[in-house]
Amino acid sequence: MLIFEVSKGGSKLYTRARAYYQRRTKPRLGALLTNQSATTIINTSALAPLHVERLEIFQRSHVAPLATAVMHALESMKPPALAALFQDTRSQHLAELTGEEIELSEREREQNHLLAVSLVALAISGVATLLHSPLILASLPLLGYQYIFVLKNTYAAFQTKEYRWLRSYEAIVMGAELLAGFYLANALAATLYSIAERALVKAEAQSRQSLIEVYGQQPRSAWVLVDSTEYEVPFAQVKVGDVVVVNAGETIPVDGNIIQGSASIDQHILTGEAQPVEKGHGDQVLASTTVLSGKVQIQVERAGNETTVAQIGAILNQTANFKEKVEMRGLALAERFVPPTLALGLISLPLVGTSRALALFESSFGYNLRLSGPMSLLNLLQIAARHGILIKDGATLEQLPIVDTVVFDKTGTLTLEQPHVGTIYTYTGVSEETVLTWAAAAEYRQTHPIARAILQAARKRDLDLPLIDDTHYRVGYGLQVTLDGHTIRVGSARFMAMEQIALPDAVHQQQALCHDLGYSLVLVSMDQTLVGAIELHPTIRPEARKIVAQLKQHDLHLYIISGDYETPTRHLANSIGIDHYFAEVLPQDKAALVAQLQRAGRTVCFVGDGINDAIALQQADLSVSLRGASTAATDTAQIVLMDSSLRHLVDVFDLGREYQSNMGGNLFLATVPSVICIGGVYLLKWGVVTAIMLYNVSLVGSMGNAFLPIIRRQLMSDNTTAKSITAPQDSAVS
């Protein structure tokens, strides 16, 4: 398939590239008026950053701009077989996560350049061969230039001790083709070599971890209390024992204990918990969390690089480069098949002669995996990206089929950011609707998850919200508004106590029960009397139960890890069908539990979304996070679900199994023709030409199998479209 498309488009590609090149090098009016050389107008910014000497040689020979022209022409033609090489959905997803454009790496630019050079050589040699023209000699400099990079990669392979046999085989075979005058065969081999290299580059990790910077986004200064006076000092000068003052809207710069004041604190960046936490005297606070309302004085226990969040960042950066590298299966198999192929050819040389020995070399036992393996990988990565699954590193697909355990973080992963209203309690004879109406009216301007939950419940009951008096609207440790001459307060028990509102014994009992069950209780008062309380429950993701059931069908062991108490964790596990859970787990212990499962022989996939999940994500064999999670989680995770839900989690494992099956087909199609070729050399005295023909048959079969996932989905899409088009017509006829 690939060879047919390249051959068919060779002449058209060359014509387009030559026309583009002529347009680019044609003298412009400005250049003519200033007597500038036309070649100075050529844009080489898109070329790979090569050594200056090579670039100058290419510039003088006009091959570099012609190679760039070929890439423009190829992208404009968009051949289906090469679509996966040029589509960039994964980079678009990464750009969405980071908020920055993902630039091409130096290696990817180099591979783009070499692919263009090899395509030019293939076009020239193909046309020259068909016309029996001496023009084929024009391809020699290009083939020689390409071969230099083959030799360079072979040398690098011996330095890194990776794929040495495979690189050596490529250097030997391509060098022999050049020396023997098989220029068209060499141009085709160089093109396939470049396509395989580009596929590998695109399949490798494209993420850029900058975790230290994430945690380093601390304020440049802090307010330190000295003798009842607040002084602004540089952040670096804050030390243990100091008292730091933090106001509403500011980020807490240190780890410590509150010694005065109280505040509503957003800990989402650390815990993934969307619900703000009320904290007061004696409570511990952590750096990088945000004070939403209130004002606190914090006695510093840890500052700078000693804070919890900084230590998490340091651990992640230290371990980022020590994870065992997973070999690409296609390359690994091709590497193992090379020594027997070379040995067979050398041993047979005195027995069958030079021609048939070369045919044994050309049998290329399993070598097609060099191209079909990366292309299978790249095609499935693109399929994943189109379905909103960002797989950062192609090696992740190698790991998926062997995962047998999935561990979920509870908060923010199995539950949604916004809670929902449960029971509404009343204390002075007012109705539930009245309590909810007053609370919703007070929360009307707020955007935090609790406010959204209360407003959503009011909308479901079709409640009409009264207008509050703007001049008496106050945000503090809770909400206070004036409504029809009455003061309505909405907030926590701490807030009510500060406002000197007495709480009935029933409230304390309900609050204790809610605490044990993992619920929250929002109190509502009118003037100085408590009138009701609204119970808020965590909202389980609507897709959670279905996903859990499907994962069980894949024979996966499922666990929940939670910092919550045992009762709410058990309740969640039972409600969605997960049998195993760990409750009351401290953030620093999550990774230890993952390691414990690994020591028991499990291959673990961890799904999490908070900074406190990042070390566990790093520890796991496979890691998944959701778009919208903390930057630490999405930076660390190998897979990010871009629709911010778990709906495609099962699809991730299905893609892993599909890749395993597809690679099995590639292996069969890469080895069976080679076995036939070897038998033909010994039994039927086949020569080099027959061996090359069988190699091409094997290559076409392997590439067809590599593109099978895309072809299958395209056919399904076409059938769906056809049904949607014909259905109205059928109904009209009937």
Image (cartoon, rainbow, N blue to C red):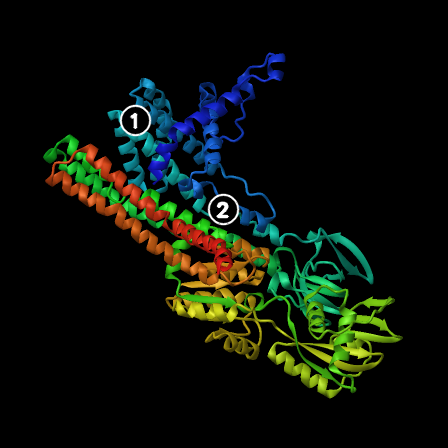
Of 76 and 668, nearer the camera is: 76
Q: Which mark is residue 606?
A: none
Q: Amino acid at mark 1?
A: Tyr
Position of 700 compared to 290: left or right? left
Judge whether residue 605 can be spotted in this image.
Answer: yes
Please determine whether, in this image, residue 649 is positioned above or below residue 378: below
Where is residue 364? Give x, y as percent: 24, 40
SS assignment at label 1: helix
Q: Quadrant of residue 222?
A: bottom right
Residue 190: % across, % down: 34, 33
For badge 2, the amino acid type reads Gln
Q: CA distance from mark 1 to mark 2?
A: 35 Å
Name the image quarter holding residue 354. top left
User: What residue is at 64 percent from the left and 79 percent from the top?
Assistant: 515
Q: Which residue is mark 2?
A: 206
Question: What residue would you read off at disc 1?
Answer: 183
Q: Quadrant of the N terminus?
A: top left
Report the residue that reaches farthest toward the front.
733
Q: Residue at x 45, y 76 (%)?
A: 579
